Image (cartoon, grey):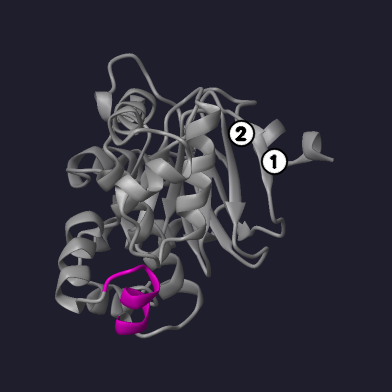
Amino acid sequence: MAGEKYYMTEVDVHSDSIYCYHNIMGEVFIPLHSHNKGQFLYTEGGVVFVKTPMKTFFLPARHYMWIAPGVDHSIHPGTPEVIMRNLYFPVYEDDDRFYSNTGVFPVSDLILQLLMFTARWHGDIFKSDSTNYTILESFKFLLEKTSKYDLPLALPLAKDERLRQVVNYLESNTSEDLLFNDLAAKFGFSPRSLSRLFQKDLGMSFIQYFTVLRMLKALQLLLEKGMSVNEVALGVGYNSLPTFSNTFQKIVGVRPSEYVKLKNVL
């Protein structure tokens, strides 16, 4: 069945086309695959995780993901009712290096309006369809011009089996006030050795990892549970609402109260 899906068979049939696909996902899992083209992915209606061999990306409302050509990825929505809006673009050697990197970016109003304009298109758009192709070329060009920074809405995957156990524990205890020394002792590490393992295996400190993990959990709670900002703060281990709000803004780009207002805006 997977081999019959459009993303496995149709996207790269014509190397010079721009491929459009807007639809309810209808699946709870899109298996690992890749494209020769770069993929613009925007979703509506729920939480979506995108996993690559190196990272797990979180794609929240009012953001898009650019997946570079050749990057293996699987897609995991919170519900089959998630609407996926996909545009697949050829990427050429003289293109800006933006298109060679994978990341999550805030979506501008201009990009969003253009995306919704393409919602009635489906399948390959060729150069012979000069009007629509030119619109999509402009869309691609605007990505590099309007996406000045990617958000750290991703976490590296632990390669060390011992560290995986630690990370799994953190994922299940985002609401707890975990002390690093206690965590190290729980899993048989000295604080120094666990600190080194975080840096060596994940390229970030425990504090950096746990903070991003908590913010990803906060986004999920805001999107799926309808909880108040204060409830979410407590749910991810912050007793101080200002501290939570400042941390959220630093990572996501807006304060949680603003994000709640934005999430339903198309």
Location of residue 7 by image quarter:
top right
Q: Earlier in the sequence, mark 1 or mark 2?
A: 1
Q: Residue tagged by mark 2?
A: 11
**Most common secondary structure along the magenta stretch:** helix
Pointer 1 with pointer 2, Cβ within 8 A: yes
Location of residue 117 by image quarter:
bottom left
| Residue at the spot 38% in from the left edge and 34% down from the top edge | 102
Q: Is residue 80 above or below residue 151?
A: below
**Amino acid beneath label 2:** Val
Q: Quadrant of the N terminus?
A: top right
Callout 1: few (<14), some (14-19), or many (20+) C-alpha neighbours within 10 Å? Answer: few
Q: Position of residue 85 (x, y in %)?
A: 51, 55
- Which stretch appears magenta? 230-238
Location of residue 175 by image quarter:
bottom left
Q: Secondary structure at mark 2?
A: loop
| Residue at the spot 48% in from the left edge and 54% down from the top edge | 171
Q: Residue tagged by mark 1?
A: 6
Residue at the far right: name it: 1
Label 1, label 2: how far apart the Cα atoms are? 7 Å
Q: Position of residue 156 (x, y in %)?
A: 41, 35
Residue 261 is at least partly visible in this image: yes
- Asked if residue 141 is among those painted magenta in the image, a careful observer would answer no
Closer to us: 79 or 34: 79
Left or right of 32 on screen, residue 159: left
Left or right of 24 on screen, residue 236: left
Q: Is residue 100 above or below residue 27?
A: above
Label ID, residue 216: none
Left or right of 39 on screen, residue 111: left
Q: Position of residue 195 (x, y in %)?
A: 29, 33
| Residue at the spot 42% in from the left edge and 83% down from the top edge | 227
**Amino acid beneath label 1:** Tyr
Q: Quadrant of the C terminus?
A: bottom left
